[in-house]
Image (cartoon, coloured by chain):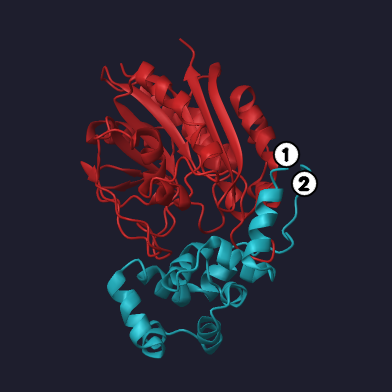
Chain colours: A cyan, B red
Amino acid sequence: MSVTKLEAREIPGTTIFDEKQALKGYQLNKMCYSFNDATCRDQFLQDEDAYCEKFGLTSGQRAAVNARNVLQLIEAGGNIYYLAKFAGIFGLDVQDIGAQQTGMSVDAFKAMLVAAGD
Amino acid sequence: MAQIVGGISTSHIPAIGRAIANGLQEESYWKPFFDGYPPVYDWLDHVQPDVAVVIYNDHGLNFFLDKLPTFAIGAAAEYANADEGWGLGTLPPYAGDTDLSWHLIRSCIADEFDITVCQEMKVDHGFTVPMSLLWGRQKEIPVRTVPVSINTVQHPLPTPARCYKLGRALGKAIRSWDSDAKVIVIGTGGLSHQLDGERAGLINKEFDLMCMEKIVNDPEALTEYSILEIVRNAGAQGAELILWLAMRGALSKNVSKIHSNYHIPISNTGAGLLVLEEAA
């Protein structure tokens, strides 16, 4: 990639976690923040709907959680640092979620990362 | 007065912590990364710092969006690590230095940086991975620590120029600390990476290498970037460059580059390492 000094609000394939996202995603992020605690992760796994209900997630957020879909979770206001804790419950790391978001296989995603060093 | 011996900036990727915990340093994936560190150990043995001021970003362990400070300084006798939710083992606590913490807080606030003061502060991988990289091979970490947290979670993030100025205020404060301690300043994180969105997996070698070159002798050139320009070039989490800039700001204008290393990829990241020694 080249170095660019262009200023732009819009960066392709990128959602800036700004006030709009922060407002939209507060409850979702609050739930994901709770997953720092192993007890909370267990509670979520035992009764996902009740756990989402406790945090007051919207129907859109609930659907994104149910789908384990990172792009939908971001669209619903999720912040990647908190979403990583959600993904961790299912043993997904940042290559797994990178592959999911880019529509690549995990191996192809990893190969893309390696190729960035060429 | 206290003396700044130099600065180190290093990536803080969680996978590094896992590799250290599992002893993977010699594996082919990891070797080019870990081979960058022995020259750092030699330099640390040479300069023997007593205290590390660690400029890092919290990724949702200590701070949540309910109360998210732009700049926070720890003022605790000890800093605990804790479960971050995705399986990295919890490490023993780190010794603090409350005398330096409060001196930094007083001095920075007098210099018009309105710092959030934290008498309790859990430190996450942004802090612990560099500590493990630099001193983990020793039985006990030989430095006391002061964590300085900069918001990279929620926009607006502080500008690169502001973070560089914070670094200058920290440097001025350290040099005026009534102590014979030797202090090292550490900036963690980076370099280019993006974890979220359709553009996940972005790494920009050219931009990273430019930053690693400029930050040595022309750091002010990097302060001309906006956060969005850095994000555009280096990815959403590439904004962690501001932590490197704060470290650089704490050092003098003239520094000697002792060592650097850059390796792609570690996890989703262009991993950078830089050791700068303060001019005598």
Residue B30 place in picture, x, y as percent = 51, 43
Asked if residue A107 can be seen in this view, the reply is: yes
Q: Dot 2, crowdedness within 10 Å: few (<14), some or many (≥20)?
A: few
Disc 2, SS: loop
- The subunit letter for the residue under badge 2 reads A
Q: Residue at x 45, y 52 (%)?
A: B14
Indicate left or right for A13 with B101 as reference: right
- Most distant residue in the left direction: B77
Please name the amino acid that badge 2 sits on: Met
Residue at which label 1 appears: B206
Q: Residues within 10 Å of mark 1 (few under 14, many from 20)?
A: some
Do tags 1 and 2 sit on the same chain? no
Q: Residue sitting at 34 percent across and 21 percent down?
A: B176
Q: Residue furthest front?
A: B27
Q: Position of residue B89 (x, y in %)?
A: 32, 55
Q: Which residue is mark 2?
A: A1
